[in-house]
Amino acid sequence: MLVALDGLLRTDPAARNKPRRKREIAVLRYWQRYCGKAETIGFFGPVCWGVFDPDSPATRLAPGPDLVDRRQVHFEAWALMAYADRLADDLAVRRWWAPALPPHLTVEGRRLRRPLHPPVELPPLEARLLAGCDGRTPAEELVERVRADGDTGLRSTADGFLLLDRLVERGLLTWDAGLPNSPRAEAVLAERIAAVGEEAVRAEVAAGFDRLRAARAAVADAAGDPDRLGAALAALNAEFTAVTGRPATRHGGQMYTGRTVLYEETSRGVELSVGTAVLDALADPLAIVLRAARWLTAEVGAGCERILADLYAELSAEGAVRLADIWSLSQGLLLAPDGPVAVAGARFTARWAELFGLDAVPADQPELRLRSADLAGRAAELFPADAPGWPTARVHSPDVQLGAASVDALNRGEFQLVLGELHPAMTPFDSAVFAPFHPDPRALRAALDADLGPARMRVLYPEGFPRQTTRTTWHSREPGDRQLGIDTARGADVEQLVAATAVRVESVDGRLTAVLPDGARWPLVEIFAYLLGALLLDSFKLLAPAPTTPRITIDRLVVARRTWRTTVAESGLAGLTSESERFLAVRRWRQRLDLPERIFVKLGTEVKPCYVDLTGALYAQSLCAMADAAARSGPDVTLTVTELLPAPADAWVTDAAGRGYVSELRLQITDPATYRGEHG
């Protein structure tokens, strides 16, 4: 980004050559990706915690002197893992770190338990070593303990280290820094370095860590000064490569992967309280959507429980059932085209079509306006669920945009509500993105516990699992929380880890229950809670794909923006070369589909939509370039257009100078009903 900006500043705007066009597109893509949308990321999308004021109808906004009042610059966990892995190559460092079993394996006596395999009988020495690999005991101490037993046949410390390395090679052991994929990785690495018992070695490895931290501090200090920032980032990248031997970027072009060494979180310098006028306008239409969300979780939960019951019946015929086996066998069944998520999602969309009466709506009708009072009774019939589908499915997270010309206009009742996404059965407030900026994170966790019970079961997903990044991990950590090991994964919390191979599944009073080694019991379906919630995000679609769908408004809440769907081939936007050809093609395409001038476009090859102003020549170049890239995957790649709503003129959240900014209200709403009358 900085390179592109610098290049544009150095060249003549009249020079329409390839390098300049490339730089212009690079800058525009950032604008399209970050500035036109309500994304929570860096200074493009700072966090601001507000309140609903039940005692005042008015909304109050008080901008501070600065747009951003707090900044936090963190290492991506992968970057610290890269440094730790280089340190671990040296036995002089590694000997002070604690080996651990992979999080999904269990050793019971001389028997090694793995998912979907019968227990393996281990040689006595291997069994003794593996049993001692608890993630707490340094290798130096562990090997000496085993040698002291006298009857294991371990002749020397060197032989013990060699055997540990062999066990690592066989996938039966991890022997590294054990850094978590979370912002805690920095603190954990500091602990690991401090644990190195030889002063000279410790000083050497600490020096490299200090170099990275100093480079990070220089980047943080350069905020707001592009020249200093560019130099600080270049120095950071050079330092990172010097101390790790690896490039300072990875996964180019991919999303949700943590591509660079650092990332920034910020909080917005503003105080906000939303009054009852907005809440009252939102309540009735959103209640219909939330009823449907409860039904969706109930359907998926019931389908999941049927799959688990069938697997349990089959496995229990052969003996005790382990959670690891049920987990592994259920994945394909849950994700199948005829599985509970897909089936419930299709039924969900079909029932919304019936509720809206879409069969009677002309294909070219631009908007459908409905009243919640007319829909509520029929919605209760179409979505007849009395309780959520699993304990933590009580909480839903809608993203609502509020459009108004100003706060004064909003308080005069001149506003529009737009439902963006709804995340069913998800609790994003307890994430490393939002919770650290809450004025009282402990109170936030206490409120969550009041709704869901005092403990969380968190699955430790393998490295590379979709959308599992440093910043999207859980924030809070309480003594009763558990971390479930289901596969190879880095950074297990040994104080909370429970291997799925150590968890029994039993039928208790007719209900499948996960029984942990310490006797704690969890509804089996709750073990799948995060996975089901992630799958439901893509299933929560009110409208089925169609060439055009209208804007649908319930009372004052837009629950579906107007959309147009076509393909790259039909659009005529791919395969063009000159700027004039591309601009004219975009204008013809807009006229043919009768599109608004400002839209969002999502190609089937992309993860996220981006903003496009169809009056702009540079936007036309960007859009046609995206169409060219998509066309390489085939002519039938979908191209979906969504109206821009709210409009830029309705950006009511302003800074101290009165400039408006795109914003949205991220909510967490708790269902008054509970899963079978219990928290979890």
Image (cartoon, rainbow, N blue to C red):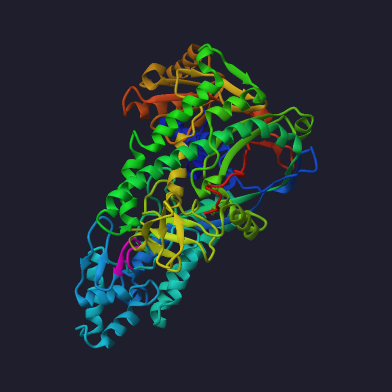
Residue closest to the eye, 577 or 125 = 125
Asked if 215 appears above or below 15 in the picture, the reply is below
Q: Is residue 31 magenta?
A: no
Q: Is residue 106 magenta?
A: yes
Asked if 554 appears above or below 41 in the picture, the reply is above
Q: Position of residue 95 (x, y in %)?
A: 33, 77
Give the residue at x 49% y 24%: 641
Give the residue at x 27% y 73%: 109
Q: Position of residue 169 (x, y in %)?
A: 23, 65
**Location of residue 80 by image quarter:** bottom left
Q: Is residue 242 visible?
A: no
Asked if 26 appears above or below 352 in the picture, the reply is below
Residue closest to the eye, 408 or 616 = 408
Residue closest to the eye, 137 or 657 = 137
Q: Which residues are magenta?
A: 101-107
Q: Is residue 117 visible?
A: yes
In the displayed structure, does residue 277 sit left or right of residue 466?
Answer: right
Q: Position of residue 271 (x, y in %)?
A: 73, 47
